[in-house]
Amino acid sequence: MTRVLVVEDEDRLRRALAINLKARGYDVEAVGDGRSALRAAASTVPDLVVVDLGLPDVDGVEVVQGLRGWTNVPIIILSARDSQWDKVDGLDAGADDYLTKPFGMDELLARVRAALRRSAEATAAVPVVETATLRIDLGAKRVQRDSHDVRLTPTEWHFLEALVRQPGKLVPGRRLLHDIWGPAYEDETNYLRVYMAQLRRKLEVDPSHPRHLITEPGLGYRFEP
């Protein structure tokens, strides 16, 4: 089933969205704040996210930025903010669509279908990265080492994907912490060390002398193909 994450703090609207999406055959998880949204997405990657901007803990734009740091899933913003600049900010943050409240449920459902169609077309063109020992299929979210499947946790996958999508480029540690764990974790550099060590054990031939998962001390990390 297609999984949709709904992020809306208004209880009545959140229930209505969940009911209507479930009635159309979607698997729905509905949460009421931004931090819960980032945790839910990290636990089980959704196929599409519907997010309100006016959340009680962090602004919805931050949720969009946090998701966009490691995933290309379609994101539709719902908001009572109807100025041109609010829409520009939301779309520039990485949202795929912007729907102003109040809205018709049929219109939202049509936009969901359209976003999922575009995502399916884009996924078909997602690259497969191959090295002498690794095969990383970003579209299928599958990693193989020496032709054997490697099981990664959702967080390990998010970390790896953030690096693989920018081969050879330094990805700052604070950005990884913000995008994977959320704004409250930007100083928790020990998280990065722990998960990088786990990835190296699973993917590197010699974890103590990594060939592909490179640390730039004090700066961040790189993936070298």
Image (tube, grey):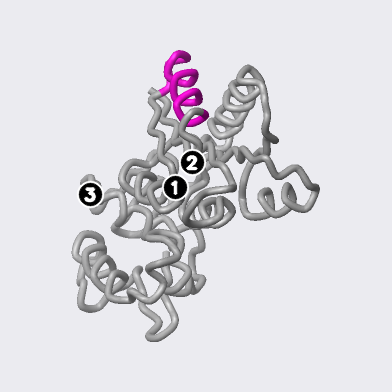
Residue matched to label 3: 150
> Closest to the observer: 82 or 25?
82
Secondary structure of the residue carrying tag 1 is loop
Q: What residue type is labelled 1?
A: Asp
Residue 172 lies, with reference to residue 11, above or below; the image says below
Secondary structure of the residue carrying tag 3 is strand
Q: How far apart are marks 1 and 3 (CA)?
A: 33 Å
Name the quadrant of the C terminus. bottom left
- Confirm whether the magenta stretch covers residue 129: no
Q: In this view, does 104 lie to the left or right of 191?
A: right
Q: How far apart are marks 3 and 2 (CA)?
A: 38 Å
Furthest residue in direction top, as rendered? 23
Name the quadrant of the N terminus. top left
What percent of the width, then of the height, locates residue 65? 55, 56
Of callouts 3 and 2, which one flags the residue occurring earlier in the amino acid sequence?
A: 2
Q: Is residue 79 left or right of residue 200?
A: right
Q: In this view, does 145 lie to the left or right of 224?
A: left
**Residue 205 quadrant:** bottom left
User: What residue is shown at x 33% (from left), y 59% (from top)?
Assistant: 132
What percent of the width, then of the height, locates residue 71? 48, 49
Secondary structure of the residue carrying tag 2 is loop
How busy is the neighbourhood of tag 2: few (under 14 within 10 Å), some, or many (20 plus)?
many
Q: Nearer the viewer, mark 3 or mark 2?
A: 2
**Residue 209 quadrant:** bottom left
Residue matched to label 1: 33
Residue matched to label 2: 9
User: What residue is shown at x 56% (from left), y 40% (from top)?
Assistant: 75
Magenta stretch bounds: 13-26
> Closest to the observer: 161 or 127?
161
Residue 139 lies, with reference to residue 39, above or below; the image says above
Q: What residue type is labelled 2?
A: Asp
Evaluate if marks 2 and 1 touch, with contact meaning CB atoms under 8 Å apart. yes
